Image (cartoon, rainbow, N blue to C red):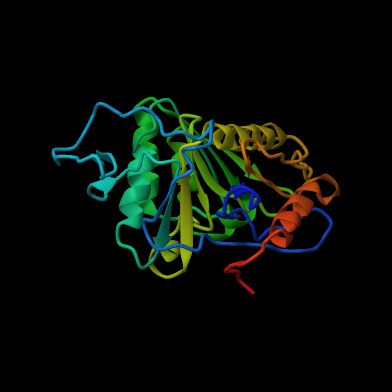
């Protein structure tokens, strides 16, 4: 998600490292903030915090503390009710429990688009959600699924989870999940042990309906294009647009329209511009 620097600070462009249209540019940015920092954009009409959940932990909450939920795996982790929250790997030991807690909130749907999926704790949680009646769908890249002998995708598919693979010439390099069509987790984080223990990675949790709608639209766009048994071709993402100061941009897109939006935001920086990229 990119917040317009004309009104708000640039938060993140976390869906990179994939060819942007015909530009031959590869791009990836990470949120520049300390672990567990809460970026509050609840002033945005479409990004207010969700209603409090009734199920609470035994810990007495105060007005200054985020809501807490019990987690089936990985212990207990704080779940924020603010609009956005960033978590970082591997230095923050609470990042994985926080991710498990967010995914564990799924009650009706859990939609996942991920390049690599080899982390068993995440796979076990996804499988439990499937068995509990949550509609789980996964989109993955066929090369990584085929080349990674420790991939959990086949096991999840064998258990009844719906899976579709991208067989096009470009990689399906997304790393996001949509919980109940209202909460989005996205970032540089692949669902692997290496991402948790070794790499510098991030996730951003967004409680923002307009952002969730954009990711949901992109997921359905890819899901329809990746029907098994049909010839697959690269599908271009729709152009992004600002809603209440925020835009979600996907690539590749037609005529590099989304790249233009992103570059315009970078050019609009007046004082500082921080970016962390993989050369």
User: Which residue lies at the image location 86% right of the left edge and 48% below the top edge?
Assistant: 255
Task: Give the side of residue 64 with respect to residue 4, left or right.
Answer: left
User: Which residue lies at the image location 76% right of the left edge and 53% below the top edge?
Assistant: 259
Residue 109 in picture, x, y percent from top left: 46, 29
Residue 18 in picture, x, y percent from top left: 69, 58
User: Which residue lies at the image location 83% right of the left edge and 45% below the top edge?
Assistant: 254
Please say if 249 is above or below 35. above
Q: Nearer the viewer, residue 65 or 28?
A: 65
Say how many tags the image has.
Answer: 0
The reply to whether residue 181 is in sight is yes
**On-image quarter of the C terminus:** bottom right
User: Which residue lies at the image location 49% right of the left edge and 46% below the top edge?
Assistant: 153
Q: Nearer the viewer, residue 17 or 208?
A: 208
Please say if 162 is above or below 85. above
Q: Nearer the viewer, residue 253 or 49?
A: 49
Task: Give the side of residue 142 with respect to residue 236, left or right.
Answer: left
Residue 4 in picture, x, y percent from top left: 64, 48
Residue 83, by quadrant, is top left
The reply to whether residue 169 is in sight is no
Q: Nearer the viewer, residue 102 or 2?
A: 2
Task: Give the side of residue 19 with respect to residue 90, left or right.
Answer: right
Residue 242 in picture, x, y percent from top left: 68, 39
């Amino acid at each position: 998600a990119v917040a317009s620097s004309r009104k708000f600070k640039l938060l993140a462009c976390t869906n990179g490292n994939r060819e942007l249209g015909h530009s031959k540019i590869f791009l990836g940015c990470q949120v520049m903030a300390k672990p567990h920092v809460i970026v509050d954009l609840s002033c945005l009409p479409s990004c207010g915090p969700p209603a409090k959940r009734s199920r609470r932990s035994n810990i007495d909450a105060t007005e200054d503390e985020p809501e807490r939920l019990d987690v089936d795996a990985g212990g207990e982790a704080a779940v924020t009710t603010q609009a956005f929250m960033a978590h970082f790997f591997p230095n923050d030991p609470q990042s994985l429990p926080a991710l498990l807690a967010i995914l564990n909130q799924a009650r009706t749907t859990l939609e996942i688009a991920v390049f690599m999926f080899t982390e068993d704790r995440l796979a076990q949680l996804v499988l439990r959600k499937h068995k509990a009646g949550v509609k789980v769908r996964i989109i993955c890249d066929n090369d990584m699924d085929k080349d990674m002998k420790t991939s959990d995708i086949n096991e999840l598919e064998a258990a009844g989870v719906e899976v579709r693979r991208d067989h096009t010439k470009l990689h399906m390099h997304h790393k996001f999940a949509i919980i109940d069509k209202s909460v989005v987790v996205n970032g540089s984080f692949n669902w692997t042990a290496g991402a948790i223990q070794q790499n510098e990675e991030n996730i951003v949790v967004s409680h923002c309906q307009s952002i969730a709608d954009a990711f949901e639209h992109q997921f359905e766009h890819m899901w329809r294009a990746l029907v098994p048994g049909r010839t697959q071709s690269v599908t271009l993402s729709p152009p992004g647009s600002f809603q209440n100061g925020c835009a979600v941009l996907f690539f590749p897109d037609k005529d590099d329209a989304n790249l233009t939006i992103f570059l315009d935001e970078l050019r609009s920086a007046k004082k500082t511009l921080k970016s962390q990229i993989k050369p």
